[in-house]
Amino acid sequence: MCPQSPSPGHLPPCAVAAAAAAAPPQLPPPRPPPHHRLPFALAPAGPPPPHPSPLLAPAAIHEGGRRSDVAAAPEAAGDEEEEEEEEEEEEEEEEEEEEEEEEEEEEEEEEKEEEEEEEVVELVVEEVVEGVEGGR
């Protein structure tokens, strides 16, 4: 026998467990197939997106009845994107080369300054040596 519930209006734990065991499990309603999930108004409008690979794209039949590669139009769009990417890469490479050239120029200037300082030090040392020898 179950003990009484400590507060009125609540079932004792054993009664809750017994009720849960007796009731059939409630499952959510089955999901509709994927093509029925979107209402017509929310379905994507327009033609399907271009095939990811122009080599695998299906061929189309033109007015003359001849089959031709449909990949020409998507390929042109892809070419434009590739050209833009290549241009961006070239610009980045040019910027990197310019930065490297600037760094090299700065290093050369620093080396020249160091050489000039060394020459000045050598001249000062020579003058001091000559002054010391001349003063003897």
Image (tube, rainbow, N blue to C red):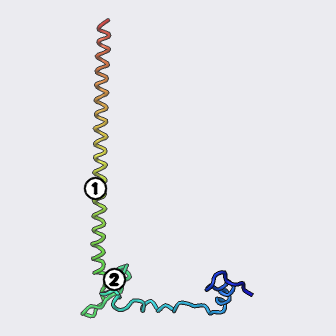
SS assignment at label 1: helix
In the image, is residue 127 above or below residue 68? above
Where's the C terminus, which quadrant? Answer: top left
- Tell me which label, 1 or 2, sits earlier in the chain: 2
- Which residue is at a point 29% across and 73% down the rendered structure image? 79
Residue 55 picture location, percent across and down: 37, 80
Q: Which amino acid type is marked by label 1?
A: Glu
| The one of 15 and 125 positioned closer to us in this rendering | 15
User: In which quadrant of the rendered view does residue 46 lie?
Assistant: bottom left
Please rate how many residues cluster around mark 2, counting C-alpha atoms within 10 Å: few if below 14, some from 14 to 19, many from 20: few
The residue shown at (35%, 88%) is: 43
| Disc 1 and disc 2 in contact, CB within 8 angstroms | no
The x, y position of residue 54, in whole percent, is: 35, 80
Residue ID at (29%, 60%): 90
Residue that lies at the very extreme toward the right in this rendered image:
1
Tell me if 29 is positioned left or right of 91 in this view: right
Find disc 2 in the rendering and name its residue: 49
To which quarter of the image does residue 68 belong? bottom left
Q: Amino acid at mark 2?
A: Pro
Residue at left offset 30%, top offset 18%: 126
Instruction: State whether residue 105 is above or below residue 44.
Output: above
The tag on residue 94 is 1
- How packed mark 1 is, by other alpha carbons closer than 10 Å (few <14, some 14-19, many 20 or more), is few
Give the foreground label among 1 and 2: 2
Q: Is residue 52 above or below residue 120?
A: below
